[in-house]
Amino acid sequence: MSPRVRSVLSAVLIALACLLAPLGALSTWATYGLGDSDRYEATVAPLAADADVRDAVAAGVSDGILREVHVRPRLQGPVNHYVRDAVLSFTETEAYRTAWETANMAAHDAVMRALRDDRAGAVTVDLAPVTERVKRRLAADHMPLADRIPVEHTEVTVLGAADLARLRKGFHVLEVAGFWLPVAAVAFAAVGVVLAVRRRRAVLATGIGTALGAALLAAAVAVGRGLTLAGLPDGVSRTAAGAVYDALTETLRFVSWLLLAAGLTVALTAALAGAYTRHRRAADAPGQAAADRSTRVGA
């Protein structure tokens, strides 16, 4: 194989490796981070203690309760205040943490089943168990009219039918690619470096390309956060949604920074090795020239 062909093929393989590295990180995160029930549960469980999430949950549950409990106008202020304080106090209990994890896992399981089983229609979750727990807590605190709070099977749409159809195709691709994209990225990079005529430059290019890909991945996560929060409907707490988004993407952000550090380290190592080699050659050049002159004089 001619050096020109080797150089072109090496450049193509290295470019593919640098492109697949962030895509591999994204697909692996989606498959083994969001798609795995145990990892998802470990991620969302600590959010039950997040102040913004607790405030958002308390506000939503309080509004739902007050819509069903009708009192005289002069009692609305005290009752509203009491209900909000009672619900906020409930968010500090073990019962709330259990309800939070149960609701989140129910939503996660419903979405995963819909994505994997090609079911039709929207994905919904019944919030009646959460309402029942709150009702029992308010009744135990002797709140007036707590026993009149209706516990209805309220289905909340987690994922619409149109969104589900679009996400299902992408999710199937990510599940297949979750393992093979990182493997392909490493293989392409290795083969590209081996084929390169100037391997040190190939290693340098691989490091820089990996760092650029990681930076783009980190930027995409940040942009995705902004777009997600901007697209929320009115009445949804953006601070709470931001806390949830940050928790779910924490691993992806860590991997992007890890790839960035690894790429820069490889590039810096290759650059320093090249500088050291050039320095050694420059230092050895006068001695080699003197030795050549001595040889010619002796001859």
Image (cartoon, rainbow, N blue to C red):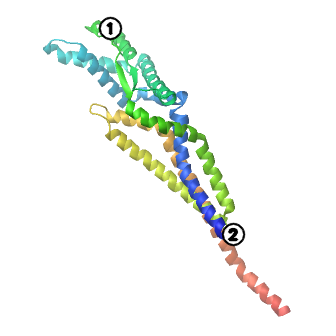
Residue positioned most to the right: 299
User: Which residue matches tag 1?
Assistant: 139
Q: At numbered mark 2, what does the secondary structure look like: helix, strand or loop?
A: loop
Q: Is residue 70 toward the left or the right of residue 219 in the image?
A: left
* Image quadrant in which the N terminus is located: bottom right
Residue 272, x across and y down, in percent? 62, 65
Q: Is residue 277 toward the left or the right of residue 156 in the image?
A: right
Residue 161 found in image quarter: top left
Q: Nearer the viewer, residue 76 or 216?
A: 216
Residue 246, x across and y down, in percent? 43, 38
Residue 33, x across and y down, in percent? 53, 35
**Type of amino acid under label 1:** Ala
Q: Is residue 118 above or below residue 74?
A: below
Q: At numbered mark 1, what does the secondary structure look like: helix, strand or loop?
A: helix
User: Residue 281: in sight, yes or no?
Assistant: yes
Residue under the image location 50 percent in, 37 percent down: 171
